[in-house]
Amino acid sequence: MKFTFAAVALIMATLPLHADILTKSVTYSQGGTPLVGFLAYDSAATAKGKLPGVLVVHEWWGLNDYARHRAVQLANLGYVAFAVDMYGQGVSTSDAKVAKMLSGQVSGTPLMAERAQAGLDQLLATGLVDPKKVAAIGYCFGGSTVQVLAYSGAPVAGIVSFHGGLMVPPAGAPNGVKILVCQGAIDPTIKPEQTAAFVKALNDAKFDYKFVLYAGAKHAFSNPGADALAQANHIEAAIAYNADADRRSWADMRAFLDELFAAQD
């Protein structure tokens, strides 16, 4: 199932595109499961040489227009972006019960890192990306996923987690990946003790990280369609769009990626 909602559709329709931005669906597989990702890049820029690459991991709703929109935004910034399919066959939903079921089949299992790695492999296989300049960003479920990817030893220089569940690194996890965590200050899905344990674990493992809280922001603060999804699923207390947190966290991501990739020159 695929879904769209008016807010995201409007954003995609009005997003200023460079004339040479190309987008396409990409069919691939992981462990025998067919997957359908989404690639976006500036063909004029890639004609001049390889670009930094960014993997995009969707919310628990699946690979929908919101995740594709973020990939196009990244392409406009000069990155080759690949939005990964974590569920298979491009499945997405707007039903929270279905989303919980779909994400539950992947979260906390080896599939979480394996599906993300399969998407990363596709990004690198394009031949458009400088393999020394690769990052991953994720939203909600996707934020947790990119944290797990970082701990797996995958060849990414850094990750950005937007309102993701906080995943404590396992003992002995490699700590060479730089981390930016963007969280809502009043996100009711993350308990203070979870935050404390997460920060302590990163400190103990000596990760290079930045943890940012955005005032007044709940879960899913970056998604303009969050309010409609909340109302439809009766979860208004948990998730809401916050324009200031969205804008500020995107700016923080841009600064993080600029510094990250400059260090690889």
Image: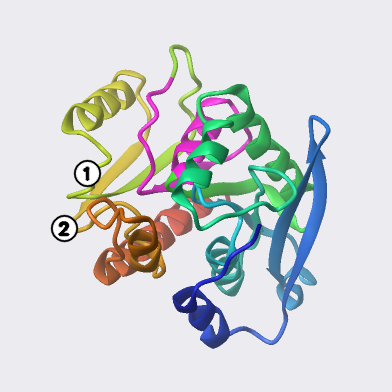
Does the magenta portion include 164?
yes
Residue at 72% from the left image edge and 82% from the top image edge: 20
Residue at 53% from the left image edge and 45% from the top image edge: 98
Q: Choose between 203 and 221: the one closer to the eye.
A: 221
Residue identified by numbered label 2: 215
Q: Is residue 146 above or below residue 19?
A: above
Is disc 2 placed on a helix, strand or loop? loop
Distance CA(mark 1)–CA(mark 2): 13 Å
Query: Which amino acid is tagged 2?
Result: Ala
Residue at 63% from the left image edge and 57% from the top image edge: 52
**Percent from the top left, x then y, of residue 177?**
49, 34
Q: Quadrant of the N terminus?
A: bottom right
Q: Badge 1: few (under 14), some or many (20 or more) residues near its Cα, within 10 Å?
A: some
Residue at 30% from the left image edge and 51% from the top image edge: 219
**Percent from the top left, x then y, of residue 224?**
39, 70
Q: Badge 2: few (under 14), some or many (20 or more) residues near its Cα, within 10 Å?
A: some
**Percent from the top left, x then y, of residue 263?**
50, 48
- Whichever of callouts 1 and 2 sits on the residue coming sooner in the sequence is 1
Does the magenta portion include 89?
no
Is disc 1 placed on a helix, strand or loop? loop
Quadrant position of residue 240:
bottom left
Q: Residue 188, labelled with which disc?
A: 1
Q: Is residue 134 above or below residue 20?
A: above
- What is the residue that sits farthest to the top in this orientation? 171
Q: Is residue 48 above or below residue 84?
A: below
In the displayed structure image, the side of residue 27 where residue 10 appears, left or right: left
Question: Which contiguous range is marked in magenta?
Answer: 141-169
Residue 130 seen by the camera:
yes
Residue 127 seen by the camera:
no
Q: Choose between 8 and 153: the one closer to the eye.
A: 8
Quadrant position of residue 38:
bottom right
Query: Which amino acid is tagged 1?
Result: Pro
